[in-house]
Image: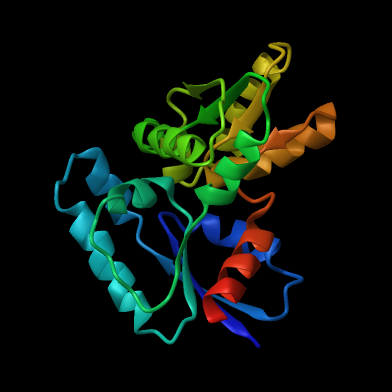
Amino acid sequence: MRKRLGCLHAHYSNIAYIEQTFFHINHIELIHFVDPGLILQASNGDSGLAFKVKEQLEWMENCQIDAILITCTKYIALIEGASIKLSIPILKIDEPFFEAICKDEQPQTILFTNPGTVEGTMGRLQQYAIQHNKEIEVVAKVIDNTFELIMQGKQEAYKKTILQALNHLKEAQRQISVAQLSMVEAAQLFEKESGLTITHPLKSLVEFVIRSTELYSE
């Protein structure tokens, strides 16, 4: 049965990543919703953002979709602990990412470009590890003065800066991950150039979405 997946993004650039990832999955139709204003408000410390995201998810629920995929880690952090009850599943892009990280017992570094997502993401990762009885050795590192490039539409400069950071870290004898969807293109290019494996949120996403929607419909 064909499923309609509503995808909530913080920036328009994330649409292409999700479209490419699900390109060969014929039974899933993607419906995209974008609100970059939420991230801008988050940087100003707006305390009403959790309610705004909750309101947006409830509005999406009424758009005849079968599940919601949240692709922004900041959005995910905002709704943690919020009382959100929908009739369809809310899927969080970082859950299969956390699963992959927790399978790796070696020391790991997770790269970010948006410092505003670090605390929420790392907190959720530690919570996930505890819930699944996993011990992980992970440190977070922010690539400074980079996130504003993607928000300004300077994608090539953004990608180049991430590649430089990955090349700098490749001798560190640690597994490297990139936490944000906007960093995936650079990670994939680095993998091709270096032969090293970079963990990122898209690697097991399709399997996770299919498994989650099938379980929900049973």
The picture quadrant where one finds residue 36 is bottom left
Q: Is residue 77 above or below residue 14?
A: above
At which x and y percent is residue 85? Answer: 29, 70
Q: Nearer the viewer, residue 208 or 75?
A: 208
* Residue 90 placement, left or right of 156: left
What residue is at 16 percent from the left and 46 percent from the top?
46
Viewer can see residue 163? no
What residue is at 26 percent from the left and 39 percent from the top?
43
The picture quadrant where one finds residue 18 is bottom right
Q: Is residue 176 above or below residue 215?
A: above
What residue is at 85 percent from the left and 30 percent from the top?
195
Q: Is residue 40 above or below residue 179?
A: below
* Residue 23 placement, left or right of 88: right
Give the quarter of the figure containing the C terminus: bottom right
Viewer can see residue 90? yes
What residue is at 62 percent from the left and 56 percent from the top?
17
Q: Is residue 138 above or below residue 16?
A: above
Farthest front residue? 133
The picture quadrant where one finds residue 100 is top right
Give the quarter of the figure containing the N terminus: bottom right
Q: Nearer the viewer, residue 101 or 5?
A: 101
Q: Nearer the viewer, residue 106 or 47?
A: 106
